[in-house]
Image (spheres, rainbow, N blue to C red):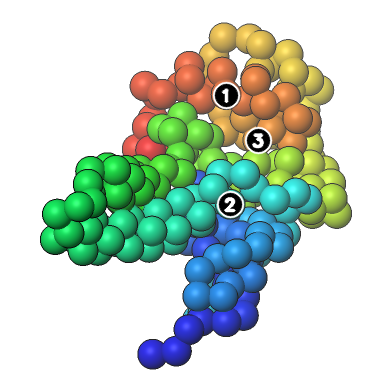
Amino acid sequence: MGILIGTMFVGKVDSLGEESIQTKFLVLGLPLLALESIYVTAEVGKGVRGFPLRHLHGRSVAAAYMRWWGWMLGVIGVLLGYVLQRDADVDPTVPWILSFALLFVGLHSTFRFGHLAPADRARRAILKSVTGVGAPAMFVPGVLQEQTRKALHAAWEKARPGIRWEEAAAAPGPFDPLLLCLAEYEFKTDLSRRMVASARDVSVKGWGY
């Protein structure tokens, strides 16, 4: 099997069903240079479908490096430690410690790092159920962002004519997913997070969390 050369999407984090955040890397055997981060809406064959983020996503980039380089350098370290322990004049303790630390980094980043917290998973599940995309509004491209915002306001006006959504959000009452989406697309993220937190014991099964 030859050395992989080219570009590929790695560093998957914040997965929600088919959706996730991944980063396109220049690869020479291992990921070397991060080129762009993508909010993935679906994986198609060996590629992805979605929209680019405005900036590199730090956790996705970190996940790619830790997963690939952590495992590779950790395995090399273990092999080096095994070779050195056979030489009576060389102390293999440091290589062993470093190699197991790197393996732990690879293990942690593969199975623990980059998962959505329960509250964020709930918020994104609700966004997806209403708008069709679980991405936070800040990740959505400008044109689609504005179209979605207008559609949410139109839906609110149709459902609750004459009532300002901000007043409804501040008033006590049953949880309304449309209000959360309006708060998100008006960039009142703190409000949308509070709404999720206060609704965690209300109709949980209906929103996939």
| For residue 200, above or below residue 66 | above
Horizontally, residue 137 falls left or right of residue 72, namely right
| For residue 165, above or below residue 128 | above
Contact flag, marks 3 and 1 (Cβ < 8 Å) = no
Q: Report which residue position mark 3 lands on.
A: 181
- Give the Cα separation between the discs numbered 2 and 3: 28 Å
* Amino acid type, mark 3: Cys
Indicate the position of residue 140 as horizontal and vertical percent values. Answer: 73, 50
Residue under the image location 50 percent in, 69 percent down: 30
Contact flag, marks 2 and 3 (Cβ < 8 Å) = no
Contact flag, marks 2 and 1 (Cβ < 8 Å) = no
Residue under the image location 75 percent in, 30 percent down: 187
Q: Secondary structure at mark 2?
A: helix
Q: Mark 2: few, some, or many residues within 10 Å (few <14, many ≥20)?
A: many
Q: Earlier in the sequence, mark 3 or mark 1?
A: 3
Q: Nearer the viewer, residue 140 or 178?
A: 140
| For residue 148, above or below residue 204 | below
Q: Quadrant of the C terminus?
A: top left
Q: Report which residue position mark 1 lands on.
A: 193
- Kindly tell me whether residue 130 is visible in this rendering: no
* Amino acid type, mark 2: Val
Foreground label between 2 and 1: 2
Q: Report which residue position mark 2 lands on.
A: 61
Q: Quadrant of the N terminus?
A: bottom left
| For residue 40, above or below residue 158 | below
Foreground label between 2 and 3: 2
* Amino acid type, mark 1: Arg
Horizontally, residue 187 falls left or right of residue 174, namely right
Indicate the position of residue 98 as horizontal and vertical percent values. Answer: 33, 45
The mark tally for this picture is 3
